[in-house]
Image: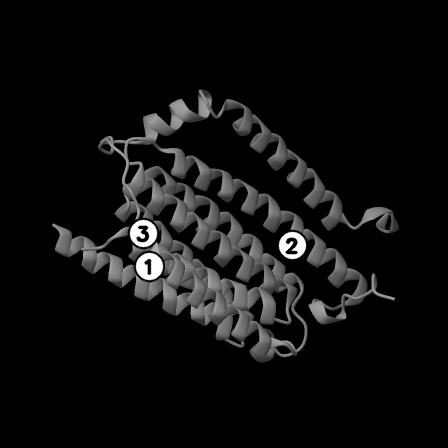
């Protein structure tokens, strides 16, 4: 059983890394958006591997569904010029590469030095009920605030995308 | 055997790739895509911590759901801003968005 888990982990890790690199490095922004969807789907597979089935479903619905559609719409509405050179680097990409690589080495060194102490207990068989209890119990107020945040973001996005008073 | 450090290394790698995309891209939509990659890396780390360190509770997954909610709100408002700027300037290049600089 651990062998198949390891196999799936390395497979999903390879897919995530390759498609994330494709998102960043490809010059056609439509291809970047499609590889972004592949990254989201592989991350959902990783959540299933970690025993978070509800989160995997949320990831597929929200990220691979809604956010991907939003991004593709924004690309189609703001497209201008040659689509094959629509996702170029700006002037400071060398500095960005140096910063990102340095941060990656710092993160790997720091996590390799840590010794994690696992807490007690076993994972419950199905965790959807536990998530529901947590949302309506100890996390009720953050849950309501998240609902208000989504409403505010929806109203703000509609107002901004409508373009203000000059259209009337 | 896959340990917590494997997941943390994968999350760190994904975060750094997203950071590079957010810093080095010219198109504003591509910058938002890099930010989405970074938020996904954070979610992977949260769920991995939950699975390996505190398996009896679901606190890490709750946090990941809140991160997803905030990411959805952020990308909706961000893309609306990009659309509005594009309608005024016919441009989505972040290097040209310097009207606040004088």
Colour option used: one colour
> Mark 3 highlights which residue?
A46
The part of the image, by quadrant, that contains residue A9 is bottom left
Characterize the local packing of mark 3: few (<14), some (14-19) or many (20 or more) Cα atoms within 10 angstroms.
many
Residue at the spot 29% in from the left edge and 46% down from the top edge: A48
Please, what secondary structure does the residue beneath circle 2 have? helix
Characterize the local packing of mark 2: few (<14), some (14-19) or many (20 or more) Cα atoms within 10 angstroms.
many
Q: How far apart are marks 2 and 3 (CA)?
A: 28 Å
> Mark 2 highlights which residue?
B79
Viewer-side label of 3, 1? 1
Residue A52, can we see it?
no
Q: Is residue A158 positioned above or below B102 on the image?
A: above
Name the side, left or right, on which B100 lies relative to A80.
right
Q: Distance between the residues labelled 2 and 1?
A: 38 Å
Q: Where is residue B46 in the image (x, y as percent from the top left)?
A: 40, 45
Name the side, left or right, on which A140 lies relative to B85.
left
Please, what secondary structure does the residue beneath circle 3 have? helix
Q: Which chain carries label 3?
A: A
Depth check: give the residue in front, A45 or A112: A112
Depth check: give the residue in front, A81 or B100: B100
Q: Are marks 2 and 1 in contact (CB under 8 Å)?
A: no
Q: Position of residue B11 (x, y in %)?
A: 40, 57
Which numbered circle lies on residue A20?
Answer: none
Q: Do the residues labelled 2 and 3 touch (CB within 8 Å)?
A: no
Which numbered circle lies on residue A112?
Answer: 1
Characterize the local packing of mark 1: few (<14), some (14-19) or many (20 or more) Cα atoms within 10 angstroms.
few
């Amino acid at each position: 059983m651990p062998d198949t888990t390891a196999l799936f982990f390395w497979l999903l890790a390879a897919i995530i890394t390759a498609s994330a690199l494709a998102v960043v490095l490809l010059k056609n922004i439509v291809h970047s958006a499609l590889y972004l969807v592949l990254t989201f789907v592989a991350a959902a597979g990783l959540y299933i591997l970690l025993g978070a089935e509800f989160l995997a479903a949320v990831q597929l619905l929200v990220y691979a569904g809604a956010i991907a559609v939003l991004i593709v719409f924004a690309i189609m509405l703001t497209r201008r010029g040659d689509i094959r050179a629509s996702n170029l680097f700006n002037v400071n990409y060398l500095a960005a590469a140096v910063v990102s690589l340095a941060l990656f080495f710092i993160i790997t060194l720091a996590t390799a030095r840590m010794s994690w102490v696992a807490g007690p207990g076993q994972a419950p068989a199905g965790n959807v009920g536990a998530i529901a209890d947590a949302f309506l119990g100890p996390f009720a107020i953050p849950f309501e605030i998240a609902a208000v945040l989504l409403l505010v973001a929806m109203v703000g996005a509609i107002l901004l995308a409508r373009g203000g008073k000059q259209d009337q | 055997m896959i340990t917590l450090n494997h997941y943390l290394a994968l999350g760190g790698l994904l975060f750094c790739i997203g950071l590079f995309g957010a810093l080095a891209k010219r198109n504003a939509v591509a910058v938002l895509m890099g930010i989405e990659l970074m938020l996904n890396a954070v979610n992977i780390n949260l769920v991995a911590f939950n699975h390996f360190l505190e398996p009896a509770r679901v606190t890490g997954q709750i946090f990941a759901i809140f991160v997803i909610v905030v990411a959805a709100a952020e990308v909706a408002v961000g893309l609306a801003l990009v659309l509005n700027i594009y309608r005024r300037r016919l441009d989505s290049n972040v290097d040209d968005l310097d009207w606040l600089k004088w």
